[in-house]
Image (cartoon, grey):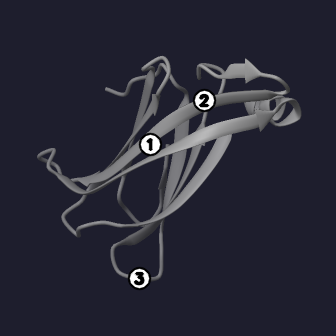
Amino acid sequence: MDATAIELSGTLWPSTAPNSYLLKLNIGVANLSLTPEGERWNGQVEVNVAGRDNAGNAYNPLMETFGLNLRQESYDRMLKEGLPSGKNLQFDPRASSVRVIVRDKSSGGVGTLTIPVSDGASQ
């Protein structure tokens, strides 16, 4: 079952190289603990991605933390549209799904998403 404290959606598309994919995420900003500082909204988000097989074994884990330093107009737009994020990934051929975990570094809030690995999938 996926955690929903942070709204999360995504698509996974095969790339030209074997076992390579393009992961496009959209992270909901409304439940992130962004702090207003002057004319900007600041915070940090951690994104964890791993391929998984049907037994739950993880392959090729990737973790990135990125800071947000949004101007008011960007913050307002992302409240409506979400925060886009994209990544080219390569997974072990045994991976049958991709597990994405997004964590708000300030609040600890989590959103998760599982996308099947196939000819093209979205959630």
Label 1 secondary element: strand
Residue shown at 65%/37% (left/top)?
68
Residue shown at 52%/52% (left/top)?
11
Q: CA distance from mark 2 to mark 3?
A: 35 Å
- For marks 1 and 3, the one nearer the N-term is 3
Is 34 on the left or on the right of 97, as rendered? Answer: right
Say which mark, if any, is on residue 17.
3
| Vertical order, 108 against 60 (above or below) | above
Label 3 secondary element: loop
Q: Quadrant of residue 100?
A: top left
Picture coordinates of residue 52, whole percent (x, y): 23, 51
The residue pinned by badge 1 equals 47
Few, some or many residues within 10 Å of mark 2 (<14, 14–19, 20+): some
Mark 2 or 1: the one toward you = 2
Label 2 secondary element: strand
- For marks 2 and 3, the one nearer the N-term is 3
Few, some or many residues within 10 Å of mark 3 (<14, 14–19, 20+): few
Is 22 on the left or on the right of 114, as rendered? Answer: right
Can you name the residue that lies furthest to the bottom here?
A: 17
Q: Tags 2 and 1 in contact by the CB under 8 Å rule?
A: no
Picture coordinates of residue 81, whole percent (x, y): 74, 36
Say which mark, if any, is on residue 43.
2
Q: Is residue 82 visible?
A: no
Q: Tags 1 and 3 in contact by the CB under 8 Å rule?
A: no
Residue kind at label 3, given as amino acid type: Ala
| Vertical order, 56 against 76 (above or below) | below
Residue kind at label 1, given as amino acid type: Val
